[in-house]
Amino acid sequence: MDRAPSTSGSSFELFEIGLDRALELIKKSDARTVGIQVPEGLKRIVSAVAKEIEEKTNAEVIVSGDPCYGACDVDLDLCRVAELVIHIGHSEMLEGDPQLDKIVYIEARMRASVDEAVEKATDLLSARRVGVVTTVQHVHKLDDIVEVLKNGGIEAVIRTGGKRTTYPGQILGCNYEAARNMDVEEYLFVGTGQFHPLGVALATRKKVVAADPVTGNVSIMDTAPMLKRRYGAIARAMDAERIAVLASKKPGQKRMDLARKMAALGEEHGKKMLLIYLDRVEPEVLINLGVDAAVCTACPRIALDDQAKYSVPILTPPEFEILLGLRKEDYLLDEIE
Ligand code: SF4
């Protein structure tokens, strides 16, 4: 979502955003103060969304200026200030905190047709039965995907994921449940970017073909470069003496028990461990702490996707177990249940 869509009422060039439902709920609840939270890729449309809400409901609108990385990352402070919070771009995930009842999740559905990319992908698929997975931005296109595969003589298998996801076939960068326990030898991922299909390949150890509906590109995932980078990070962390364990304050990334477990394991193996509780993981946090490495129990993408930003190695919890010699089997992808 790195191109900024232009606006036209509640419709956007690249995404369909169901603002009508939000407007209806605001009117029904009679909320006088409405918060809006959007991911970075949609920030440029937020002024148009705010204006539309103000004009159509007369409510005061407050926009969260903090970055938002996923449905895991809701602004609970904004929930305390506003009577209703419109969280745009992700499907519902969290429960438990009473503040979460104020959140209305409005998904951003990508308009791009999937047909051409999926048809191209059938040339790379050898199996006649494949698992199909996608992200929330394309999940409304699953029927189209199934149809195109069927026309190519391929049966699509779609599975419901765990409690972090809303739709069958939906995966997240931290959860590949919808790709597991399928009796298939190959997967088709439909969506943008390489991170999710690489995750499917690492989580299933099966062949994954990625079809990007925006660029039209199709490719077979190769996990070797990613694994090389990850084992490189583990090797660089081997001699680290002072290691930070990062525990997130974000409601859907908080894994305090796991963070404590990692800290205890490190201490048992002679490392000086420092448990850090924080909202945003940023390079300067680690520089200022003067640690030699970090174990990140927050979003797995921080270690796997953003390592280049950091001057010290950032490991996921399973990678830290490899470093300590506690995990001998195959590489295990860090996932949040
Ligand atoms: S933890 Fe990371 S990958 Fe998972 S939903 Fe949040 S931002 Fe996305």
Image (cartoon, rainbow, N blue to C red):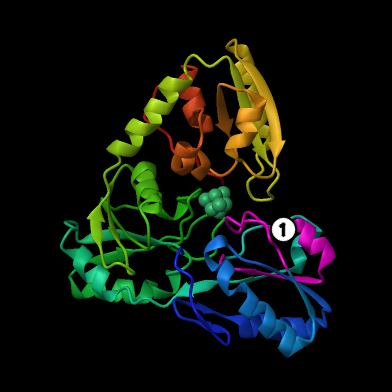
Task: Relative to 314, say whether 264 is above or below.
Answer: above
User: Observer-nearest residue: 315 or 97?
Assistant: 315
Three-letter code for the amino acid on which mark 1 is drawn:
Asp
* Residue 317 on image: x %, y %: 53, 31
Q: Residue at x 50, y 17 (%)?
A: 324
* Residue 323 among those drawn in magenta: no
User: Observer-nearest residue: 273 or 309?
Assistant: 309
Residue on which the image places disc 1: 75
Task: Report which quarter residue 254 is drawn in.
Answer: top right
Label 1 secondary element = loop
* Residue 69 among those drawn in magenta: yes
Question: Is there any visible trace of residue 258 in the rendered image?
Answer: no
At label 1, counting other C-alpha atoms closer than 10 Å, the crowd grade (few under 14, some 14-19, many 20 or more) is: many
User: Observer-nearest residue: 249 or 236?
Assistant: 236
Query: What is the magenta range?
Result: 63-90
Q: Residue at x 48, y 75 (%)?
A: 5
Q: Residue at x 35, y 52 (%)?
A: 194
Would residue 267 be found to the left or right of residue 26 on screen?
A: left
Task: Relative to 117, say whether 99 is above or below.
Answer: above
* Residue 227 on image: x %, y %: 34, 34
- Confirm if mark 1 falls within 8 A of ligand 1: no
